[in-house]
Image (cartoon, helix red, strand yellow):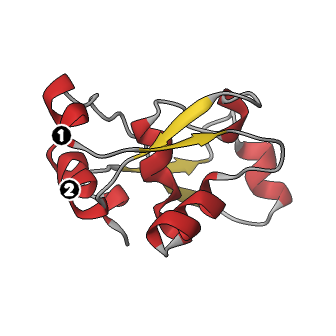
Amino acid sequence: MGIRYNRRSRILTDSDGIHEELLESRDIKAVEHYDTPSFERLTLENRYSLQNRHHVWGVGDRYWKLASEHYGNSNLWWLIAWFNMAPTESHLTPGQIIQIPMPLEVALSYMRDA
């Protein structure tokens, strides 16, 4: 798995009464999934050390498209979301300015330290 899964615990959802009907309808006994991560915010020093590219959020924009365009890898969409403290596209509105953290290697190193 990618580095976004480092240090993440796994949770086993089984027949606990709440999910029992759903599990039975899918004919499975349990689902293992990752816990929701919580990342620390970047320090101001780290933020100012990056050379961010600005992007005006528009209709049809997606994190994965921006990651593909700026990093050459759509799987790094989560880095843009984390940096802008907006976990999903629905947290953004058209016309909002977001930042694409650059250079990639430096931004990733800060994320690893968070």
Q: Amino acid at mark 2?
A: Val
Q: Which residue is mark 2?
A: 106
Q: Nearer the viewer, residue 107 or 32?
A: 107
Up the image or down, 3 lies above or below 1; here it is above
**Residue at 20%, 24% in the rendered image:** 44
Asked whether the residues under the numbered discs 2 and 1 touch, taking CB atoms below 8 Å apart as contact, a structural biologist would say yes
The kind of secondary structure element at disc 2 is: helix
How far from the left and from the top, in percent, is residue 34? 45, 52
Up the image or down, 113 lies above or below 66; here it is above
Q: Which comes sooner in the sequence, label 2 or label 1?
A: 1
Q: Which residue is mark 1?
A: 49
Q: Nearer the viewer, residue 77 or 27?
A: 77
Count neighbours of disc 2 (C-alpha within 10 A) and say few if under 14, some if 14 to 19, many if 20 or more.
some
**Residue at 79%, 48% in the rendered image:** 22
How far from the left and from the top, in percent, is residue 1? 37, 72
Question: Image check: 35 left or right of 113?
Answer: right
Q: Nearer the viewer, residue 84 or 24?
A: 84
Q: How many marks?
A: 2
Q: Does residue 34 appear anywhere in the picture?
A: no
Count neighbours of disc 1 (C-alpha within 10 A) and say few if under 14, some if 14 to 19, many if 20 or more.
some
**Residue at 65%, 62% in the rendered image:** 65
The kind of secondary structure element at disc 1 is: helix
For residue 4, what is the image quadrant?
A: bottom left
For residue 83, what is the image quadrant?
A: top left
Up the image or down, 54 lies above or below 74; here it is above
